[in-house]
Amino acid sequence: MYLNHFGLSQAPFSLTPNTGFFFGLWPHVEALQVLQTALQTGEGFIKVTGEVGTGKTLICRKLINELPPGFNCAYLPNPYLSPTELRWAVANELGLKYSSDIDQQQLTGLIQQQLLALSAHGHSIVLVLDEAQALPDESLEALRLFTNLETENRKLLQVVLFGQPELDERLKLPSFRQLRQRITFSYNLRPLTWDETDAYICYRLAVAGCAGAPLFSPKLTRKIADASRGIPRLINILSHKALMLSFGEGSSHVNAAHVKGAILDTEDACNQTPFRWSTYVAIALMTLTAMFVALAMWGEDLRLLWGNSV
């Protein structure tokens, strides 16, 4: 909607975890360093946790894209699976075909044989699970048993868990003490500081093609950092809405009213100013104006297209 207006080539604050926008902020770089070190040393279980929106999936994709030579990834983005479904999902990632004639004991044996064959050819298999807090208890135990598969020198399967803080709480239970003791490397993603938030916003705009004067002043990025609590997903949402409001007014940059409007329009943002109905009406008018401008531009494009076709 506002790309041409601000001279951007792509959306700078999309919620899709695009590794092309990976900035290399310290918490994300440190998490990747921990993961790569753990994989190189052959550890069985590795865990990364963080609040919703802190960038776990982006780090997960970055890890998969940059695995060291000799490592192969089996990726499960949706781990809400029963033990049987989990085994078959792993088997499928290893290249085994489903058969209803194979029972669970046979399937475990086939997985072990496949892992041994891959290991003999110099392949190290990494099983990566995103949203691991969704794993049922029985499936967590089945996952632990996978790490019993090993040679005299190393594990046949390394497991990387990405999850929300609820995963840490579950692993504190006595019933998961065996699994907890096998997690030799772990990392907890923290929110971004104000300086990191400012650099993050500027970097994403630069990647998206912004080459002129800064669209956000440092004072405004501080407001966004405070309201978002340093959570990258909320930073993206607030920045995107502020740009929409600025575009709706035909402004060349974002001002304090645009950021305030974005904060008030975002449920999970921390609004530290008293709510006034006049502010709400102003936000609504700015949003409607942006919509009408976009519709007018779209209508003009359609008229030109129709005129050219005639």
Image (cartoon, helix red, strand yellow):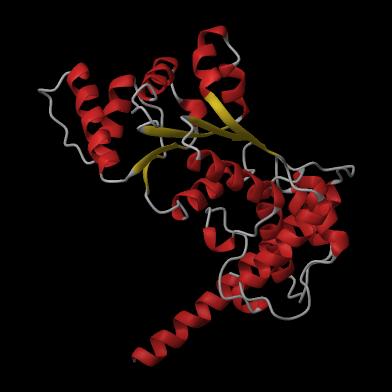
Depicted 245 relative to depicted 147: above or below: below
> Where is residue 103 drawn, in percent x and y?
17, 18
State the residue in front, 36 or 18.
36
In this view, which residue lies farthest toward the left? 101
> Can I make out residue 260 in this image?
no
State the residue in front, 153 or 171.
153
State the residue in front, 97 or 159.
159
> Where is residue 56 drawn, in percent x and y?
57, 43
Q: Residue drawn at (57%, 75%), measured in percent from left and top?
A: 9
In this view, which residue lies farthest toward the top? 174
Quadrant in the picture for the C terminus = bottom left
Depicted 16 relative to depicted 148: above or below: below
> Can I make out residue 148 in this image?
yes
Q: Residue drawn at (45%, 80%), measured in percent from left and top?
A: 302
Residue 220, image quadrant = bottom right
Q: Residue drawn at (72%, 55%), measured in percent from left and top?
A: 284
> Where is residue 111 drawn, in percent x and y?
24, 29
Residue 146, image quadrant = top left
> Where is residue 10 drawn, in percent x and y?
56, 70
In this view, which residue lies farthest toward the front? 152
Q: Residue drawn at (26%, 45%), measured in percent from left and top?
A: 121
Quadrant in the picture for the N terminus = bottom right
Left or right: 102 as drawn, with respect to 242: left
State the residue in front, 150 or 201.
150
